[in-house]
Image: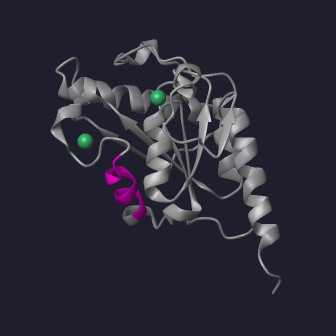
Amino acid sequence: MQKERSNIAVFLDRDGTINEDTGYLHKPEELVIITGAAEAIRRLNSAGIKIVIVSNQSGVGRGYFTDSDVEAVNDKLVDIIGADGAKVDAVYYCNHHPDEDCGCRKPSLGMLKKASDEHGIDLKLSYVVGDKGSDIELARNAGAKSVLVLTGKGKDESMRLKNPPDFVAEDLASAVLWILDDLNRRAASLPAG
Ligand SMILES: [Mg+2]
Ligand SMILES: [Zn+2]
């Protein structure tokens, strides 16, 4: 019996979490998906959980590339993992310079609030997975649970986190296993009836 989980999301960082972080990636042809990422997302799809990508893309605000470059990479990513049967429910990104104080750059809550309104997501039941301290702080600001992945910048970041994540995972595949276990633990701890 599948529990109703459509109000739960896993918010995924993009660079260093789903794909290799090559530094201000803006060319779709340079996109490399991290091993096991598509399958991991497929598992969350099967569990009835929403998948929302939330990405800081300050390269736009810094003038390194444009919104259409970001969108081309996002579209290609959705296509590649889609070919492996993985579905993404929504993609949001912040294109601002860090100095702009925009309210959407992680760890600010703008993108999560928007996703919550547009997709009926309960942030407090949700998860954030990423390779940086800003992803962990984002989860904290939302009252969500956090997983730090050690891909991308994760190993370096793990040494200087302000607050510990709920779990540290080798990669997205192992993050997803932990999340699915955590959901089952939560379900088991609910009173019967
Ligand atoms: Mg990242
Ligand atoms: Zn922003």
Residue occupying image coordinates x 58% and y 63%: 125
Q: What x and y, as percent, mark residue 48?
A: 66, 58
Residue occupying image coordinates x 36% and y 16%: 27
Viewer-closest of 137 and 7: 137
Viewer-closest of 158 and 127: 158
Is 68 situated left or right of 88 in this image?
left
The magenta span reads 108-116
Quadrant, the N terminus: bottom right
Residue occupying image coordinates x 40% and y 19%: 28
Q: What x and y, as percent, mark residue 134?
A: 43, 37
2 in relation to 40, above or below: below
Q: What x and y, as percent, mark residue 104?
A: 29, 46
Viewer-closest of 100 and 177: 100
Residue occupying image coordinates x 57% and y 36%: 82
Please tell me whether the stretch drawn in magenta is mainly helix, strand or loop: helix
Is 95 situated left or right of 1 in this image?
left
Quadrant, the C terminus: bottom right
Q: Is residue 60 magenta?
A: no
